Amino acid sequence: MESGRPYSRLLSRLERYGPLEHHERQRISELPLTVTNVSAHQPITLQGDKPSRCTLVLGGFLYTHKMASGGRRQITSLLVPGDFADLQALHLHNVDCNLSALGPAVVAFVAPAALNDMLNRSPRLAQALWRETFIEAAIYREWVTNLGRRESIARVSHLICELASRLQTVDLARNLCFSIPLTQAELADACGISSVHANRVVQELRRLELVEWDSRQVRIRNWSGLARTGDFSAEYLQLPFCVEEAAPLEERVSEEA
């Protein structure tokens, strides 16, 4: 991986299941990207827009959301560095949700025509992005299950486990510790609970010594306990590694003892 390049974390994602050929990596590196800094909560696309670009997350976090009656917001996904936020722009005529920055973020815009041209020239890259799209669909199904059938503490625990797992893939959650500008209100909107209840759930996770959540940093203290609480299995993420192996050393030593 070419560390520090705009496409480095995308390559890391696409090469999870095997290295790409040099010419395939070259095609990605030659994509015409427009790199832009976006501020916290800045809208990137709005529901109903005609898509004119695809958005690659380089740094920070984005989120998709829809508005229900009464101005209530439901966050429907969180996008981490290395994610394409809106590959549907390659084929669909309208955007079906809002896309915004969770906190300050860096994104790269690429024209759908340029991305389509690259995929037409490289069947392996097309297959890799199709695989990422299928995994994205699996994440959506898991979120539906989380919102519909799990208790509040399980919803929050599951979300933390998922974020840690996805961020490990792009080397942003070493020792199951990561930074994310997720406010109490945003956590509530992602888990379908009230802000007050979200605060209570986080306090309970702290009391159980499952997580440390100070300001914008989350540290999982007990991976196996948090995963049990959240009914979490990483199978739907199709990871090429075992998340448990990345648990903090003190947890692994304690379990072995």
Image (cartoon, helix red, strand yellow):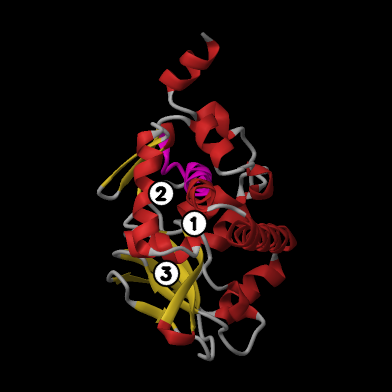
Does the magenta run of residues contain 167? yes
Q: In which image quadrant can residue 251 be found?
A: top left
**What residue sits right under mark 2 in the picture?**
201
Q: Position of residue 38 (x, y in %)?
A: 31, 71
Label 1's element?
loop
Q: Are marks 1 and 3 in contact (CB under 8 Å)?
A: no
**What residue sits right under mark 1 in the picture?**
82
Q: Position of residue 142 (x, y in %)?
A: 64, 56
In the depicted view, which residue is nearer to us: 111 or 42? 42
Q: In which image quadrant can residue 94 be found?
A: bottom right
Q: Residues within 10 Å of mark 2 (few under 14, many from 20)?
A: some
What amino acid does circle 1 point to? Answer: Gly
What amino acid does circle 2 point to? Answer: Val
Cα separation, mark 2 vs mark 1, equals 29 Å
Q: Is residue 164 visible?
A: yes
Q: Is residue 103 left or right of residue 52?
A: left
Q: Is residue 245 left or right of residue 125?
A: left
Label 2's element?
helix
In the depicted view, which residue is nearer to us: 191 or 100? 191
In the depicted view, which residue is nearer to us: 106 or 8? 106
Q: Main secondary structure of the magenta part?
A: helix
State whether residue 136 is above or below residue 100: above
Q: What span is colored magenta in the figure?
A: 160-174
**What residue sits right under mark 3 in the picture?**
108
The residue lying at 53 percent from left, 65 percent from top is 84
